[in-house]
Image (spheres, helix red, strand yellow):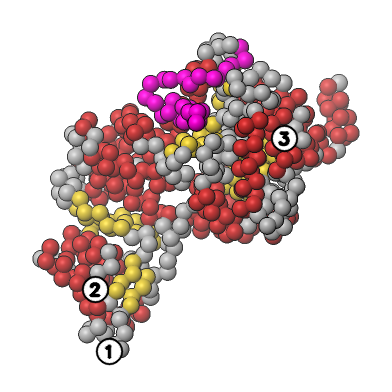
Amino acid sequence: MNAPAPSVPDTVGAAARGLPARGGVGLKPEHFREILATEPDIGFFEVHAENYMVDGGPFHHYLGRIRERYPLSIHGVGLSVGGESPLDANHLDRLAVLLARYQPESFSEHLAWASHRDVFLNDLLPVPYHAGTLARVCDHVDQVQDRLRRRMLLENPATYVEFAASTMAETEFIAEVVRRTGCGLLLDVNNVHVACVNHHRDPYAYIDSLPAAAVGQIHLAGFARDVDAAGDPLLIDSHGAPVAQAVWDLYRHALARVGPVPTLIERDSDIPAFAVLLAEAYQAERLMREAAAPLIVESLSCGACA
Amino acid sequence: MRVSEQRILADALLSARPICPPGLTAWNGSDPGRRFAVYRNNVIVSLIDALADTCPVTQQLVGEEFFRAMARLFVQENPPRSRILAFYGEGLAEFIGAFAPAAAVPYLADVARLEMLRVSAYHAADAVPLAPEDIARLLEDVAALPAARIGLHPSLAVLRSGHAVVSLWAAHQAGDVAGALAAVDPDVAEAALVLRAGLEVEISRIPDGAAIFIMHLRQGAAFGHAAELASAADPAFDLGATLGLLIHRGAITTMTIPGSATS
């Protein structure tokens, strides 16, 4: 039998090349035709795996054609990596089929749970951080990487509650999962902002305490505002609004730390015209270029300040 | 073995009452129930939204408020058992049929059933229709025809309803829904053919005999037997017209006539 590898190499086709360090947009059925008709200059597209676990029809028709033209990220929302229940072997099989069909440059999932036993809750639910959950999450990530024969990226969550049972900081937990499993990180900068506001933490320190070298992709999205029982701000990861200025600022900090990485604009509700999302992806690329040429930016912003 | 923490959370997420599980905290010491309610809301609302996406006409027939209240009860009693939400609405029609407050709209369950068939057809496997000239050649073998097996497109489904489901559904695709609805007698029985042609799902009204014929073909009956059953159930059954419809719409994907080899 094979000994577990310290890191899982991406040896299969497109996965070995990876996504380009450019802006990308979540692919929405509303935009299928326009994308094929206009072939916009964009770094990549991302889809939710579960939406394409259907036999045929327009979803596969369009994704197949779009994938021929663009790099692709497949992002799972239903694997329940943080679940107490064993991983669903059937679901893993469906993922393997989907990945074999589309050969995406990247596959990612969440540090969260979404189902308990056979009930699927359709949300990314929070996990307490302690030795027991760490062992379970690492075991699940190992299983995913073994079954899919590729390195996965694990996304940091947006959370609204914390657990009395937690003994580790979220960043400490994530860093340990990365160290033990060799998985990569999908740094969701909006989630960092949302979680840090909700739990009164410093989002810049949060990013600084993650293993920068493991970051393979960044997500940017919009949030909604609410308040908790004490009237303190409670941000909701809605994916229903443009990327907020605070998140762009934090993104700039993340880029300074991890360098230019593929950056996705996520939008799952109140879907605007494709051009609006494309403009946000271009904004991310501008910030990537600025981060790569810090001296020029410094002199420009000094000029603007004067 | 201790009680599963996620079981407690899952139960609280689906509970009709706003329960807050133990062990949750907030940095400012505020009531974590308010925060946990964000998850409760995400779960329930996203699942109601999934049902509303599947059944827009069902929702229009009873109004958004009624539909969402009904869907909430459905979600709490029947949370998804699959991670693929496209087909989550499959149990909704049956639920509506037994939902007393919807009894005043007796056709509601069948409209929901039709809308679910439409979504299933949208995502069904692709298949290439048999060319009409190939079908014509096979049909020429009159002696062998009764034993022929007809393979139908994976997206094809029929629905026989005691109500005017196709007309009700079609009225909601019109520009003037109220005007179109006024012309529909909901108590007229109708049969629907649901079929994806290329990338578009089409819903059309077909005669009852045609629906019976197609259902028997779908269940694997031989051509001749399906035609006999359809004629017996509906004296007006028109085999030629039904075949013409299936060929014209590209619904036939395979046709096998058992070999003439004798045993």
List x then y, in percent, for residue B177: 28, 41
Q: CA distance from mark 3 to mark 2?
A: 64 Å
- To which quarter of the image does residue A87 belong? top right
Identify the element where label 3 is drawn: helix
Using the numbered discs, state the Cα–Cα distance from disc 1 to disc 3 in whole angstroms: 71 Å
Q: Is residue A303 above or below residue B210?
A: above
The chain letter for the residue carrying disc 3 is A
List x then y, in percent, for residue B217.
26, 67
How many neighbours does mark 2 have within 10 angstroms: few (below 14), some (14-19), or many (20 or more)? many
Give the CA distance from mark 2 to mark 1: 20 Å
Residue A125 lies, with reference to residue B260, above or below; the image says: above
Give the secondary structure at mark 1: loop
Which numbered circle lies on residue A212? none
Contact between marks 1 and 3 (CB within 8 A): the answer is no
Question: Which residues, given as a range, are shown in magenta?
Answer: B1-28
Res B223 label? 2
Q: Is residue A266 visible?
A: no
